[in-house]
Amino acid sequence: MLAEDLDTIHAQAVRGERFHALMATVVGRLPLGLSGIVAPSFLGFALINGFTFAIDLGLLTVFRSGLGWPLPLGITLSYLLAMGLSFLLNRSLNFRSHSPVGPQAVIYLLAIGINYVAFILGVGAGLAGLGVEYHLARISAGGCEAVYMYSVMRWAVFR
């Protein structure tokens, strides 16, 4: 490995440790005994995936309303791009994984495939098909997928 590669790896590890320390500090200050219930990785997941969900909705709006693409195509492409970003950010910042990326990516791809069929198409497109405005349908699906994806990332992908 080159010295530059080692510097990059070290910088990524430092960013991950800082992110985790910040999440642990915030969780430690939660009221009503929540600090004993909420894991720092859950707060990190919520922040990262809240951000990537906003990216997902923004891209969906551009693809559907801006470019006039069919809703299934817009949902699919915006979802894949946002989930790729979520994987990278959660891997490096939140779960601070140093395991080989290949096996993690395979498990993650299986998980997002299940998530896509069950929640994005099943709940999101299903609600949109029933007449619910597509942003609201996607937000509803997002609530379901958040619980599922945190569980999969925490206990299967980045264990």
Image: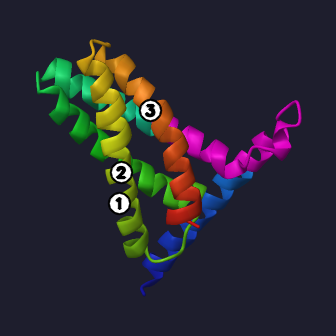
Q: Is residue 82 something one can see in this rendering? A: no
The amino acid beneath tag 2 is Ile
Q: Amino acid at mark 3?
A: Gly
Q: Amino acid at mark 1?
A: Leu
Q: Are marks 1 and 3 in contact (CB under 8 Å)?
A: no
Specify whether residue 145 is painted magenta: no
| Mark 1–mark 2 distance (CA, rounded to whole Å) | 6 Å
Which residue matches tag 2?
A: 114
What's the distance in space between the residues labelled 1 and 3, CA to CA? 18 Å
In the picture, the disc for residue 142 is 3
The residue range painted magenta reads: 22-51
Q: Is residue 126 left or right of residue 1?
A: left
Type of secondary structure dominating the magenta stretch:
helix
State which tag comes first along the sequence, 2 or 3: 2
The earlier-in-sequence mark between 1 and 3 is 1
Observer-nearest residue: 105 or 122? 122
Q: Which residue is mark 1?
A: 110
* 115 relative to 134, above or below: below
Q: Secondary structure at mark 2?
A: helix
Q: Residues within 10 Å of mark 1 (few under 14, many from 20)?
A: few
Which quarter of the figure has residue 30?
top right
Could you tell me residue 80's position as x and y percent? 29, 46
Callout 3 secondary element:
helix
Q: Residue at x 27, y 16 (%)?
A: 130
